[in-house]
Amino acid sequence: MKLLDFLRGERKKSASVAKERLQIIVAHQRGQRDQPDYMPMLERELLEVIRRYVKVEQDAISISLDRDDDCSVLELNVTLPRS
Amino acid sequence: MAKIIVVTSGKGGVGKTTSAAAIATGLALRGNKTVVIDFDVGLRNLDLIMGCERRVVYDLVNVIQGEAGLNQALIRDKRVDNLHILPASQTRDKDALTSEGVEKVLESLSEDFDYILCDSPAGIERGAQLAMYFADEAVVVTNPEVSSVRDSDRILGLLASKTRRAERNQDPIKEHLLITRYNPARVDHGDMLNLEDIREILAIDLIGLIPESEAVLRASNQGIPVTHDANSDAGQAYTDTVSRLLGEDVPLRFHEYQKKSLLSRVFGGGRR
């Protein structure tokens, strides 16, 4: 099998795929962990307001809060559909 | 004052109860007065793993609701002197556990015991949160598998926010990683996350590594915690884990793949 793998050209080991996927999802989870409790609610309500005017999908909106030492940045990303 | 250790994981089936039973047994074998509590109300299994299922009369919920005294519910382990088991209730609804009730039970156990192990149910619901709420230390049981690692990270988040130590701004719970069902051969093949990767992703210290082992099923079949199987790899790995919990510096074992020689391949590897 080793020889075959070699001849086929090294395929990516499944464990390293697992590691990459986990690093991304865990980083995402940790980002959410430090968010204030009102964030999911804020996200929902913002989405409602936007939807009153534009038809967007549930997952077309992302919201994040980045905190530096002396200021916080609330970032809101909405993907508008092509009209 | 007893030290309260929660054995938790988020995901089910990763070896929480096996680990809680094995670690409790190991701590008691080292001379510590130890009690292990099953928090899995409705789905108790610790009694089976500890081999005392036929001696359960009263349970944690009976004690909390004042229907039995703590001493009536505690089951003395038949193999180790210093070890007691407090079983979970089988039938009642999950709301039977109250935070005040659990606190009271832990407080009175604290007077008599050195170590209190809380065997958490799977999930992140009330039962799991109550099992971890009063803990001083946490053993996070993780399999080398994506869903288990992800759930462990969720549990770490809860340990850091939804516990008494967190709410009171006390020193945080000491978090330990226990990797179970580790298969060095598959890691060597690149088909299983290796322990360094898991440790790096979760970013907590490794307290032990339990190899995937036939001894674990054999132990649960018989209701004898695997720590008693001193010849087995898993038994020894749990004994090492207990030593590290007690603050000793024990080198890691069973994490390296030993390629079998031709002779042992022909004649079989012997008992694992």
Image: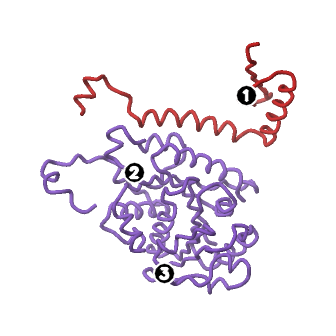
How many marks the image carries: the answer is 3
Sequence-first tag of 2 and 3: 3
Is B207 in front, or is B187?
B187
Name the amino acid, label 2.
Tyr
Q: Where is residue B208 in the image (x, y as percent from the top left)?
A: 44, 55
Q: Image quadrant for the C terminus of chain B?
A: bottom left
Is B14 in front, or is B111?
B14
Q: Distance between the residues labelled 3 and 1?
A: 54 Å
Chain of the residue displaying label 2:
B
Is B28 in front, or is B88?
B88
Residue at point 73%, 73% (across, down): B101
Q: In which quarter of the image is residue B202?
A: top right
Marking on residue A62: 1
Q: What element carries label 3?
A: loop
How many residues crowd around disc 1 within 10 Å: few (fewer than 14), some, or many (20 or more)?
Answer: few
Which colour is chain A painted? red
Q: Position of residue B268 (x, y in %)?
A: 18, 57
Chain of the residue displaying label 1:
A
- Left or right of residue B209, residue B231 in this image: left
Marking on residue A39: none
Marking on residue B77: 3
Marking on residue B182: 2
Which colour is chain B painted? purple
Name the amino acid, label 3.
Asp
Name the amino acid, label 1.
Ser
Residue at point 52%, 34% (across, down): A21
Chain of the residue displaying label 3:
B
- Left or right of residue B52, residue B235 in this image: left
Q: Distance between the residues labelled 2 and 3?
A: 29 Å
